[in-house]
Amino acid sequence: MTKPLVSVVIPIYNMEEFLVETLESVLTSNYPHFEVILMDDGSKDGSYALARQYAQKDARVRTYTQSNAGACTARNHAISLAQGEYIFPLDADDKVGAGFFKQAVDVFEADKDIKVVYSRAEFFGDRSGEWKLRPFSLELLARKNMIPVSAMFRKSDWARTGGYCNVIIAREDWEFWIAMLKDGGKVVRLDQVELYYRVRSGSKRIADRPLKKHVIDVLNKRHPEFFEKELGGPLRYQRSWSRLINKISLIFHPRRMIMGNDFQDLSSFMRTLPIHFENEGILIYEGRNRLKEFDVHDYKLIVKSYRIPHLINRIAYNFFRASKARRSYGYALMLRKAGIHTPAPVGFYSTGTWLLFGHSYFVSLKSECPFTYRNLAEDNFQGDKERVLRAIARTTAALHEKGFLHKDYSGGNILFRETVEDVIVEIVDLNRMRFGKVGLETGCKNFERLTGTREMFAVLADEYAKARGFDAEKCLELIEKSHCS
């Protein structure tokens, strides 16, 4: 039975001095079925010519070149061309033991839940001795990397994670292992020394040390849920103290979060909502507040970020009043319980200190309604305008009959879609609501921000009056009066 193909990918940048030693270590492997992908990253020395010489004399070796773009791009490019089921990245100045590929493949083939296999390692060059790598755990991976870049994994897992991140310019293997392992999977370290890591003054590992802040910033942006789960918050620059710092931070910067029971699978997203909002999502509105759309776990979400209020309200929202986000969530639940359509509320999140309220976010499912009231005024609107207007009037009447007065009842906050049987109307932007009896004059005045022609107002007035038992002419008079005041 033919063994699975292993693809050894080696990015090369000015490695003429070391490449022969590296390639010879690979080509003496006792595993019978492997290929070598050499990706020259725009070297200025003789590296590419040397790589081509190996490709010409050994059919297992393929050589490619690209303009200089960095190790991540070179490694991803090489893997995209690889034909193997298993991938083994190797730096062009390191060496691999002859027995590693066979042992690693055997481990993979015995357990489909294994995602990564690596071995013990030794230094050579300017340093000698064993590379003391601590046993793998996700909690430790959140604070430091204990898996060398030269570890074997499935190409399918590389594709699933999106490959090596091109944004991070140091410790890219750490980010890659987090992306691959944060949702589970086993990691195996072989007992034998099968990796030989060269230490030299100009090595990338040494050159990357001043980039610690950059690395941590990128990791926090890309994997906030992972760090929240493992460290109770972001990875700190004092990495070993991250969990303690996060616990103390929550004392002085408490967060408030409520979620609906139907959306508990979004809890990780919700707990790290501010980071997601700043770095991800599709911006759909920006003004005093901001709206973004997200795709999370097969949900389409709309997140509204409210502007930080002025000082007095920052104190009030902390102790005396519900924030806009909290009101939006609570009012949406009330409307839906009353049978009035609004997008399903997912939850809300707020930040601040023990004294001052900070940012707040309201999260709901994205509405399936493609139109707003404003579309009715457009010449190219293809729907049944009168049918839609009557449906909006009935929804408005239902709001008022149940004691809800929407204080921001404008065209952009009334959504609708037409079906064969009916017109579905949804009401959004709910943080400004008043409750109590809504009489004739107050109810008709609530139409004041809905623009339109006299004919449109006549339809609204007629249907609103029917639904509430009022006189249609009186309703039209009051609606028109509200637009003149």
Image: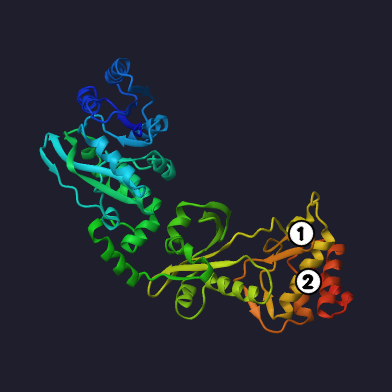
x, y (%) of residue 174? 30, 46
Q: Residue 289: x, y in percent?
A: 55, 61
- Camera-nearest residue between 232 and 139: 139
Q: Secondary structure at mark 2?
A: helix
Where's residue 94, x and y in %? 21, 32
Viewer-nearest of discs 1 and 2: 1
Outermost residue to the front: 1
Q: Which circle marks residue 394 in the picture? A: 2
Q: Is residue 473 left or right of residue 157?
A: right
Rendered position, 220 above or below 261: above
**Whether residue 417 is visible:** yes
Q: Which residue is mark 1?
A: 419
Number of residues whose C-alpha sits closer than 10 Å to that of mark 2, classed few (under 14), some (14–19) or many (20 or more): many
Residue lying farthest to the bottom in this orientation: 437
Vertical comparison of 475 with 237: above or below: below
For badge 1, the amino acid type reads Thr
**Pick the front one: 481 or 439:** 439
Residue occupying the point 32% across, 60% down: 230
Left or right: 310, with 385 as reference point = left
Quadrant location of the C terminus?
Answer: bottom right
Q: Residue at x 52, y 68 (%)?
A: 347
